[in-house]
Amino acid sequence: MNYTNTPINKIGKVVTGKTPSTSISEYYDGDIMFITPTELHSDYVVTKSEKTISQKGFDSIRSNTISGTSVMVGCIGWDMGNVAVCKETCATNQQINSVTDIAPEYNPMYLYYWLKTKKEYLFSIASVTRTPILSKSTFEEVLVPVPSKKVQDAVSNVLTSIDKKIASNSHINDNLAA
């Protein structure tokens, strides 16, 4: 099978999140998700976040927001490399680099599943002082082995169906426990 090693920044736009000013209370408790690394530990698709921001908060950091199907990766701290997908317009904090505006020749779920297996690699290329940090510029240059779109779609369809079943079973277990 042929693969083309493609840097992440050629697959989509890389956005580092940003936190709206916490001193302005009207920026918070709105209808827009504000995703932090905590949400990257949940289901593979983030559909709700613990924190939310208002439209004013969103507008204050608009250039650091994501929309459409985006792949989010935790890039700071000892649990770096956690990955999730968001299919809505939202904001993330500065610990997350997201790949958004993904070009049509790439399947976002293929990128998600590839990155999901690269936690140790991402940690290995991070700079480590007191806290490991994978910079945006280093993250953008990570090479992803990309097969044809047909293969990306086939791989993503199989793995997504498994993740959907896992999520469904998890929800059933939660309901039974309640």
Image (cartoon, grey):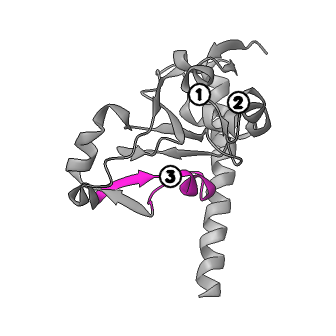
Q: Are marks 3 and 2 in contact (CB under 8 Å)?
A: no
Q: Nearer the viewer, mark 3 or mark 2?
A: 2
In percent of width and height, residue 24 lies at: 24, 55
- Would you name the residue on which mark 3 appears? 36
In percent of width and height, residue 92 lies at: 44, 45
In the image, 143: left or right of 12? Answer: right
Chain part drawn in magenta: 31-49
Considering the numbered disc 2 on the image, is that residue within a helix, a strand or a loop? loop
Q: Which of the 4 image quadrants contains residue 149? A: top right
On residue 126, which mark appears? 2
On residue 135, which mark appears? 1
**Looking at numbered disc 2 in the image, what kind of residue is underneath it?**
Ala
* Quadrant showing the C terminus: bottom right
Q: Nearer the viewer, residue 38 or 26?
A: 26
Between the C-alphas of marks 1 and 2, the distance is: 7 Å
Q: Are marks 1 and 3 in contact (CB under 8 Å)?
A: no
The magenta stretch spans residue 51: no
Q: Which of the 4 image quadrants contains residue 174? A: bottom right
In the image, 123: left or right of 59? Answer: right
Identify which residue is drawn at 59% across, 57% down: 43
